[in-house]
Amino acid sequence: MLSHHTRRMANVASRHRTLVPRAGMQYAVASSSDILATSNVIMARRPMVNSTSPKTSSILPSADLDLHHDSTLAHAPPSQMCFSDSASAHGSKSTFELVRAIGVFNVCRLSFIVKHAEGLLGLSTKVLGSSITNTVVKHTFFKHFCAGEDSADMKPVIDMLQQNNIGPILDYAAESEGSEDDETPGDVEGIYTLPESNQPARVYDYKSESECDRHVETFKKCIHSVRDVSPTSGFAALKVTALGNPKLLERMSTMIVEVKALFSKFDENGSGLISREAFVRCTRHHFHVDEANLTWLLKLLDPDNTDVIDYISFAQMLSPYTLPSFTLKCKDVGPLALATPSDEEVVLMKKMSERLHLLAEEAASCGTKLLIDAEHNKYQPAIDNLAYELQQKYNAKDRTHRPVIFNTYQCYLKDTSERVATDLRRSERFGFHFAAKLVRGAYMVHERARAKEMKCPSPIHDTAESTHRCYDDVVELLLRHRSQHGPGLEIMIATHNQESIEKAVDVMTELGLGPNDACAHFAQLYGMSDNLTFTLGNHGYNAFKYLPYGEVDEVVPYLLRRAQENGDMLSNVGTEVTLLQEQLQKRYSFE
C-alpha cells in the first residue's frame, strides 16, 4: 500500500500544473496531464513523414490580423483545395511582375550568387555607384520581397492582399543590430560590472544601450504603421536582441539554465516535485540559511501547505532579477554562483524589460499584436523568459479576450514539444492566453557548429523528417487544446511546407474548427509561396503575408541576411517558377 506521504505527493502532483527541467530540455511536464496524453496519442498515431515530402523550412513571422472574410467565400474541404492553380496564385500580377518574379527566382536558385551577394553588391556599388546599384535592387529584389519604403508606399500592396482576403504582417526591416560578437573597445566609455565570486569584470558600452533606446522608436514606428494600414487589428514583429545587449541576453540565459540545474539537484527522485523535507535538507546543504529564512522560503514556495514545491514556484523565486540575493549565501562557488548577475547587470536587464513593456503597452493601445522572434539558442531562454513576462500581463484573461503577445517556437529544436506543452500549462496556471508562432527554424548551421565548438550535443533534430514530425505534432496538439478548452489560444502556422498546411487544415476540419476560426493563422513570406497564401485566403482561411519594409539602402542588409538564412529554400523554388511560367504562357497563348 502507498504511504500517506506518497499518496499526498501523488494527489498534489495531479493538482499542480508543474514544469520541471529535464536533461537536454529547457522544460518538461512533471505530472501526467491531458496535454501530454493528447501529445502521446498524436505521437503514437503520427505516420513517419515521407522522405519525398517538401523539405522547405520557414523562419517567417506570422500574425493574427482578424480579417473579416466574405461570408460568401467557398469553404472547400481540404481535399478540394488546389495549391497548383497558377491563376489563383499569380492571376493578380501584371505581366511585368510575372517576368520580374521569374528572373528573381532564377537568380536566387544560383547558390554562388546568394552566398556572395554581399560582396557582389559591394563591387557594384564601387563600380557603378550606390545610386545605380540601389535603383536596380529597388526595382528587382526589393520590389519582389518587400512591401515598400513607408506606409504610403505599402498601401497598394496591402490593398491588393486584402482584396484577396490576405492580411499584412509588418516588419520594419531597417534596424541595425550590430555584431553580437563585437568586443567593446578599450577607449569606449561603458557600464562596468563587478560580479561576485571573483568573476572577470564585463563592460556594456553606452553605444549599445543608446542603440537599444533608438530601436524602441523604430519598433514604435512599426506598431504605428500597422495601426495605419490595418486600423482594427494588426501585427508587428519584434527582435529582442535589438532591445538588449546580446551578451547580456546570453548571460541571462545562463542564469535560467543554472536555476533549472539546481532544481534538478533538489528533485532527488526525479518526480518533478520537491517535498518540504527535501527542500530544507538541500537548501541547508548548498546555502548558509537560518530557520527564519527557511520558514519564509517555505511559505513563499508552498503557501497552501501541500508539502511539495514545483518548478514553476522555484523558478519564480530564483528569477534573474532576484538571483543575487540567494547566491550571496552559497556555501561553494559553483555554476549558479558564477552565473549570478552583478548589480549593474540587474539594472541593465530591468531596462531591457522596460523597453519591452513600453512597446507592449503601445501595441495594446493601438490594437496591434506583437510577435517575439526566436533567435539563437544561446539567447532563447532569456527571450522566452521575457516573452512569458509580457504574456502574463498583456495576455491576461481578465484584461483581454484575445492575446497580444506571441512567442515563437522553432520546431527543429529537440526540446520544442516539451516547451510548448509546459508553456501551455503555465498559461493555464497563471490565467493568460497562450499564443505562439510556429516555425521550423532559422539557424541550423549556426547551432550545429556552436554545439560542435562547445563539445555538447546538437540541440537540432538529426533529420528533416524529425523536424517535420515535430512541427505537425505541435500544431495538432494546440488545435486539439483549442477544440477542448474553447477560444483564447491562438497559433500562427508560419510555414512554406504545403504538407504541413494540409495536415493542419485536415485537423481543423476533423475538430469542427471553421476556416476563419481565430485560433489558426497561416503565413508565408511576401514574394514566395503565393500558391499557398492566395489559395488559403480565397477559401476563407486566415491567411497572411509577412511584409518587410523600409528604405532600400537600409533594408539591403536585411535582405542579404534573409537570403542566406533561407538559402536552401530559395534554391528549391522550381514549383514557384513553373506556376509563374504557366500563368505567363496562358496570357500569350493563341490556342
Image (tube, rainbow, N blue to C red):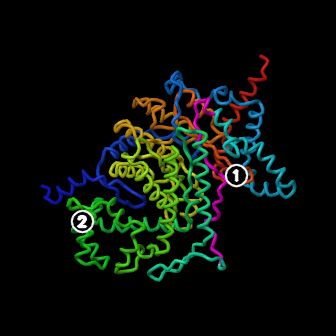
- Image coords of residue 490 (percent x, y): 45, 41
Is 169 inside the magenta-drawn segment?
yes
Is 178 inside the magenta-drawn segment?
yes
Quadrant (top left, top right, bottom left, bottom right) of the C terminus: top right
Residue type highlighted by circle 1: Val
Above or below, 196 relative to 30: below
Considering every residue shown, the one lying at the far front of the view is 365
- Image coords of residue 407 (percent x, y): 48, 50
Considering every residue shown, the one lying at the far bottom of the view is 198
- Count of residue discs: 2
Residue identifier under label 2: 299
Callout 1 crowding tier (Cα within 10 Å): few <14, some 14–19, many ≥20: many
Q: Which of the 4 image quarters holds residue 444?
A: bottom right
Q: Are marks 2 and 1 in contact (CB under 8 Å)?
A: no
Provide the secondary structure element on which disc 2 rests: helix
Report the front residue among 535 and 85. Answer: 535
- Image coords of residue 360 (percent x, y): 50, 52
Q: Which callout, 2 or 1, points at the residue further toward the start of the chain?
A: 2
Callout 2 crowding tier (Cα within 10 Å): few <14, some 14–19, many ≥20: few
Q: Which of the 4 image quarters holds residue 389?
A: bottom left
- Image coords of residue 530 (percent x, y): 63, 34
C-alpha separation, residue under disc 2 versus residue under disc 1: 53 Å
Residue at the spot 63% in from the left edge and 50% down from the top edge:
172
Say if residue 431 shows up in the picture. yes
Report the front residue among 242 and 211. Answer: 211
Magenta-highlighted residues: 161-185
Left-right relation of 302 to 372: left
Provide the secondary structure element on which disc 1 rests: helix
What label sits on residue 555 in the rendered view? Answer: 1
Considering every residue shown, the one lying at the far right of the view is 127
Residue type highlighted by circle 2: Lys
